[in-house]
Amino acid sequence: MLTGKQKRFLRSEAHHLNAIFQIGKEGLHEKQILGIEEALAARELIKVKILETCTTSKEEIADELSQNTGAEIVQILGRTIILYRESEKELYQLP
């Protein structure tokens, strides 16, 4: 569980990142989850964009991603979800 201070730090680090995954009208599927897991292992901090055509709510998608990947939800801002999962590389030194 991330503290408020850690979430603020991660939000500031994620500010300049671009979303590397997009969730469309089909919603979330297994290949996307696998890709997100790989991206989290390599980068620790990623953004996922939910397109307007997606019929599933952003909260449901964020919860499903968190459960299936073991990642923490840093923030849901508009249609963008910021996820963090610590990897062995420890790219971000959390306060």
Image (tube, helix red, strand yellow):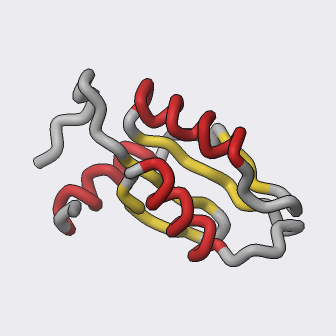
Residue drawn at x 52%, y 30% is 38
Q: Is residue 89 left or right of residue 28?
A: left
Q: Is residue 76 left or right of residue 51?
A: left
| 12 and 75: which is toward the camera | 75
79, above or below 18, in the image: below
Q: How many marks?
A: 0
Query: Residue 33 occupies which quadrant of the picture?
Result: top right
Residue drawn at x 26%, y 52% is 9
| 5 and 69: which is toward the camera | 69
Residue 71 position within the rendered picture, expressed as x and y whole percent measured from the top left: 39, 51
Residue 53 position within the rendered picture, expressed as x and y whole percent measured from the top left: 88, 67
Q: Is residue 60 left or right of residue 90?
A: right
Query: Residue 50 occupies which quadrant of the picture?
Result: bottom right
| 32 and 42: which is toward the camera | 32
Residue drawn at x 26%, y 22% is 89
Residue 16 position within the rendered picture, expressed as x and y whole percent measured from the top left: 50, 41
Residue 62 position within the rendered picture, expressed as x and y whole percent measured from the top left: 54, 65
65, above or below 46, in the image: below
Task: State which quarter of the image contains the N terminus.
Answer: bottom left
| 28 and 49: which is toward the camera | 28
